[in-house]
């Protein structure tokens, strides 16, 4: 069964030890993001060099499929359709095991950061496995062999393509084969952490696949094999230097940290983002590199750090640090195009932190600094943006705004292409939340709405933004004013 998704993607590290035990009854911290098309940040990951039954069990249990709001069937797209999330659970578990069956892929089937390619539903996941599984360490197996491999700690899955509807996928977990088939965990129409294949697939006959490219040791991690505790390195002081080696997603080490420091210096990452995975080239770092490439005319915008990007970053550091970027003029939107901005400090940093508290747990989590920066850039009150983002799409946690990275639910117009916007029906789909946020601020700070904001005529602004012929503009105005006051009091 499939997700009709929604889209900053936390990076994570591969470890060989669990800081605590998981029994599958309660989801672990970092696993409950209900914006299902975003990655999770679970505390425990499997190590391909040390496959063992205990770690595989614990990796599955930490997601607690039967009690995790991330997998609760719901209308995630605002179209009245009840969506299920079997493919998302499969993605989460295999990603945590270092054998990712992706949810987002490019045209060649390679895993990409959320929002960078196309999404795979359950049927498309089966197709991906047939076309790309072998080169990613997966091979077909019998039900009995899949159970045997799972019991040795190797990732194993069950996949069923439904030619006449929605397919289904599940994880084969350590256990035993019964009359109900191999042991399994799944999300979907039924969500459970410990069951068997027929409990979820019924009479359907799934295919079984295993990834036994790792080394089965049978030895759970011990204190002697645990990596040192993860600590947050202090922010860089003084100058920064561009890495001399090529880097891409999955690489770890001091050269990646150098790259992250440069990205912070140039305004493409925040220190808070780096601190979620210092020295780890994860989705956030990849997205920041891709944005830098796009802004500096480097094609393709792959997010891979190579010679062209190295040269451009070196030049950017020689100049003004990349903190501002001139943009085009005209159009319905604002007077400048997208570009990195300086990071907030002092009272702005405090305001950003307060906004982050308001947005915690929503689709706009962690965007406080960006909202403050855009508010200053386009001279639009942040409390107005917060109120409208809440009204339009519950802070990008509901409706098509989630999938479109479009917290203001902007209808498509040509000027939005300078923020990466593309038409998706009547609305605009942006490459990431930051682009969608900036496009909203550009619109309200531009000629179409500038006068309303300068006069404080929010009723007139809302009548234009959400016409009475299509909306209850009176209620919209009342709620926006109420929430603006609430947020103004909170953020100062």
Image (spheres, rainbow, N blue to C red):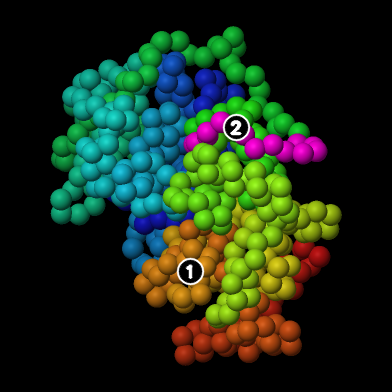
Q: Is residue 147 left or right of residue 475?
A: left
Of the 4 image quadrants, the one containing the C terminus is bottom right
The answer to whether the residues at label 1 and label 2 have Cβ atoms under 8 Å apart is: no
Write down the region rendered in magenta: 236-249
**Does residue 32 appear in the picture of this structure?**
no
Q: Is residue 358 left or right of residue 29?
A: right
Residue 36 versus residue 224 in the image, above or below? below
Residue 476 in percent (x, y) is at 58, 81
- The residue tagged 1 is 417
* Residue pictured at 52% horizontal, 27% vertical: 14
**Does residue 163 appear in the picture of this structure?**
yes
For label 2, the crowd category at 10 Å Cα-Cα, with few meaning under 14, some 14 to 19 and many 20 or more, is few
Q: What's the mark number on residue 490?
A: none
Q: Quadrant of residue 376?
A: bottom right
* Residue pictured at 47% horizontal, 90% vertical: 469
* Residue pictured at 50% horizontal, 45% vertical: 303
Q: Quadrant of residue 309?
A: top right
């Amino acid at each position: 069964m499939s997700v009709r998704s929604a889209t900053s993607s936390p990076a994570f590290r591969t470890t060989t030890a669990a800081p605590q035990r998981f029994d599958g009854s309660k989801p672990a911290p970092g696993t409950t993001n209900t914006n299902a098309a975003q990655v999770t940040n679970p505390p425990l990951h499997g190590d391909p060099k040390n496959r063992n039954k205990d770690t595989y069990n614990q990796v599955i249990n930490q997601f607690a499929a039967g009690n995790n709001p991330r997998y609760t069937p719901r209308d995630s797209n605002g179209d009245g359709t009840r969506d299920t999330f079997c493919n998302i659970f499969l993605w989460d578990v295999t990603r945590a095991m270092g054998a990712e069956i992706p949810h987002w892929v490019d045209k060649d089937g390679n895993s990409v950061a959320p929002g960078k390619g196309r999404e795979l539903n359950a049927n498309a996941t089966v197709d991906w496995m047939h076309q790309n599984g072998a080169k990613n360490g997966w091979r077909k197996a019998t039900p009995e062999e899949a159970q045997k491999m799972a019991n040795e700690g190797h990732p194993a899955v069950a996949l069923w393509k439904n030619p006449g509807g929605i397919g289904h996928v599940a994880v084969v977990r350590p256990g035993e084969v019964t009359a109900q088939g191999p042991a399994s965990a799944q999300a979907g129409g039924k969500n459970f952490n410990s069951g068997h294949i027929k409990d979820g697939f019924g009479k359907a006959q799934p295919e079984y696949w295993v990834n036994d490219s790792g080394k089965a040791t049978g030895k759970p991690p011990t204190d002697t094999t645990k990596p040192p505790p993860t600590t947050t390195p202090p922010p860089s002081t003084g100058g920064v230097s561009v890495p001399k080696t090529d880097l891409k997603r999955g690489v770890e080490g001091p050269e990646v940290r150098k790259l992250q420091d440069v990205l912070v210096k140039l305004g493409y990452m925040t220190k808070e983002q780096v601190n979620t995975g210092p020295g780890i080239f994860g989705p956030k770092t990849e997205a920041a590199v891709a944005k830098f490439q796009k802004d500096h005319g480097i094609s393709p915008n792959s997010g891979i750090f190579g010679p062209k990007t190295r040269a451009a970053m070196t030049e950017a550091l020689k100049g003004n640090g990349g903190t501002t970027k001139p943009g085009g003029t005209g159009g319905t939107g604002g007077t400048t195009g997208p570009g990195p901005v300086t990071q907030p400090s002092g009272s702005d940093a405090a305001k950003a932190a307060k906004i982050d508290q308001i947005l915690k747990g929503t689709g706009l989590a962690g965007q406080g600094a960006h909202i403050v920066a855009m508010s200053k850039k386009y001279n639009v009150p942040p409390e107005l943006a917060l109120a409208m983002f809440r009204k339009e799409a519950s802070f990008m946690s509901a409706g098509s705004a989630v999938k479109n990275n479009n917290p203001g639910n902007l209808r498509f117009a040509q000027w939005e292409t300078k923020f990466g916007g593309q038409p998706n029906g009547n609305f605009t789909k942006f490459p990431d939340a930051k682009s969608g946020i900036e496009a909203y601020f550009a619109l309200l700070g531009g000629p179409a709405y500038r006068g309303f904001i300068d006069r404080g005529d929010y009723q007139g602004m809302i009548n234009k933004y959400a016409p009475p012929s299509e909306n209850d503009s009176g209620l919209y105005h009342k709620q926006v004013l109420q929430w603006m006051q609430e947020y103004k009091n909170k953020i100062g």
